[in-house]
Amino acid sequence: MTEKFGVTPQSRRDFIKTVTGSAAAAAAVFGGMGINPAFAAEAAAVSGRSEKPLKAAFSNAGLQASWCAQGKAAAEYWGKLFNVDVTWFDGQLDAVKQRAAIDNMASQDWDFVAIQAFGIGTLTAPVQKMIDKGTPVIDLDTLIAPLDSINVHTFLAPDNEFMGASMTQALVTAMGGKGTIVMTQGALGHTGAQGRAKGFESVVKNFPDVEVLDTQPADWDVSKVARIWETLLTKYPTINGAFFHNDDMALAAAEVMKRHNRTETLIGGVDAMPPAIEAVLQGRMLGTVRNPSGRIHGGAIVAGVAAVVGGEKTGEGIPKSIVTDGPVVTKANGEGMLWMQKHFLI
Amino acid sequence: MSNTEITVVRTGGFGNWVRSQLRNIAPFLTLLFLVVFFSVAKPSSFLTVTNFANILNQVSITAIIAVGLTFVILCAEIDLSVASIANVTGIAVAFFTLQPDYVNIANLPLAGPLAVLIALAVCFALGMFNALGVTLIGIPSFIMTLAMMQIADGMSALFVRGQIAYTVPDIVLTLGSGNIFGVPWIVIVAGLFLLVAHLVLTYTRFGRYVYMVGGNREAAEYSGVNVKFIIGAVLVIGAVCSGVAGMLGVAYFGSAQQNEFGTYLLDAIAAVVVGGTSLFGGRGGIGNTIIGLLVLGVLNNGLDHVQIDPFFKILIRGLILLAALVINVYAQSLRSKAETGTD
């Protein structure tokens, strides 16, 4: 890796000597983790890595979801690089349980916190308490509260409408701009699902020869997906395309199609988690759009460190909202995407 | 029940008394163990007044639901619809309240007190359906309330259609998320529900009948107790308690949405049973429910204060609850032996 970047051990040492003490400490940590120390030193110098370990609390919707578990791993990975001890409060895919966890989080002291709400508006009181204490709160992926009712440090989230539109566009293009299509939605109350549905609709309305057969929600539930698709495959002799609001549902439906020997359907998903990318590479799925868990959770570490060490404030150094989009993953870029995910870069 | 206990003390001494009371003592010891453990493990953050207040806050909604469920379980019945009724009542009160412009729900705004009354009527009516299904038609409460769970969930879905509502009437907002002299109103409301329920169960004829129906239904019937009325009444009480919890819960959480309160079903049942109330009816009470609530509250809260793998926390929580339940069942058998005088 060192040779690849053209930095010799000697020049690397010289470079490290020129940076601050904190950056030198960063280099030691980075080097120990197999990351190019020159890059590490530079990154640490830019971000203002803390000498003393920072304490950060994280919570996302629920670690049962592979996307969230990947986010946890990314936060911990980037936390080690930036000298941040990450404590996790699992949302357990349950608004009540997450609220209790965030109440407990708010009763302790943290340098910064990062939260992906399972239910919008359910965490407002304890989050406000932390903000009032002066703790930077970084909002991940889903709004903690509607509009500008809460003053979070920043909001790191993908553009769900864009993701829905870009995947649908890829599907419709592959269908030749005509045929039948199904959208299987996530939970209707989820803003991510609402955005993805909006993106889907914005594309299909431009194609009069594309007929939308069904848009039922399956609530992210793979068993519900199986039930819905058993019915759809019986009801419709040909389904040319199918857009699913996440990969887990897409893969579950792909299994149902396989059992029914129905191979005509082009499948598109969202999240681009490794099993879905494998399915894309094997041709079982046409594509999946990346919802960059690593970028969102790792970005929260960087944003938190920059706030605590570098003194960044909302609107002064960091914008109120940061869009963290990912590309549509196809056979062409699948391998690269897997590598980037392995190293928590996207 | 208390007469039996006195006899045991006279005839069997302290050992038998302990055995007969193990159902009550064991949950208390579990609670004590958890408090000591988390206090030693994380004294700086766990053992604070703020955190104690936090625990009380966190168990308040479960407490109100558990009050109703205690009546139901004491009658040897079960109500699986409590969380769904809480959810639909909370959604109903928001549905009949004026929402901000960005809320995309075709709702019907009414005056606050009227919205509260309609929401209360909703949970009362659902409780009545449960009661009629169980007592008149003869559907087992497990099945009847399972169906009601689906019905209430369906009503919730119809009210909000996947959207989220945020505003509730002022009175609900105050009781759900306000404070008085630094004490959250929701803790006071939960305390009042627990107190009134305890008084009813301990000092009223209705309370005695609840124990009689749960302890020996046939005997109660032969004694002239209107068993069907008692069972119907406890199901309505359960639904109304859930409805109140749902309304305050919406204010506490700050939003009303589908599938919001699902977790309260198992939490409320666990609080009642872990506290020592028998699932087979006739034994236990509000005191047990309070201990059960605190066991769950301390356990859930404490696990967030100690640094352990979050994937491991769920397992630990399950194992501790299992241990508490095993002790509960074991205590039941020891008590039976103590009462019959066998070893």
Image (cartoon, coloured by chain):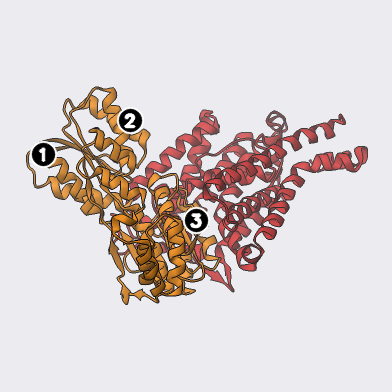
Mark 2, other Cα within 10 Å: few <14 / some 14–19 / many ≥20: few
Chain B in the picture: what colour?
Answer: red
- The CA distance from mark 3 to mark 1 is 45 Å
Residue A263 in sight: yes
Q: Nearer the viewer, mark 2 or mark 3?
A: 3
Front-most of residues B280 and B169: B280
Image position, residue B154 (x, y; %): 38, 41
The residue that appears at 31% across and 29% down in the rendered structure is A255
Counting residues from the start of the chain, the first of labels 2 and 1 encountered is 1
Going by the numbered disc 2, the residue's amino acid type is: Arg
Image position, residue B312 (x, y; %): 56, 46
Side (left or right) of A314 relative to B149: left
Going by the numbered disc 3, the residue's amino acid type is: Trp
Q: Chain of mark 3?
A: A
Q: Secondary structure at mark 2?
A: helix
Residue hosting label 2: A227
Image position, residue A229 (x, y; %): 28, 31
The residue that appears at 66% across and 58% down in the rendered structure is B41
Residue hosting label 1: A210
Give the chain letter for orange. Answer: A
Asked if residue B258 is positioned above or below residue A84 in the image, the reply reads above
Where residue A245 sits, quadrant-wise, is top left
Counting residues from the start of the chain, the first of labels 2 and 3 encountered is 3
- The CA distance from mark 2 to mark 3 is 35 Å
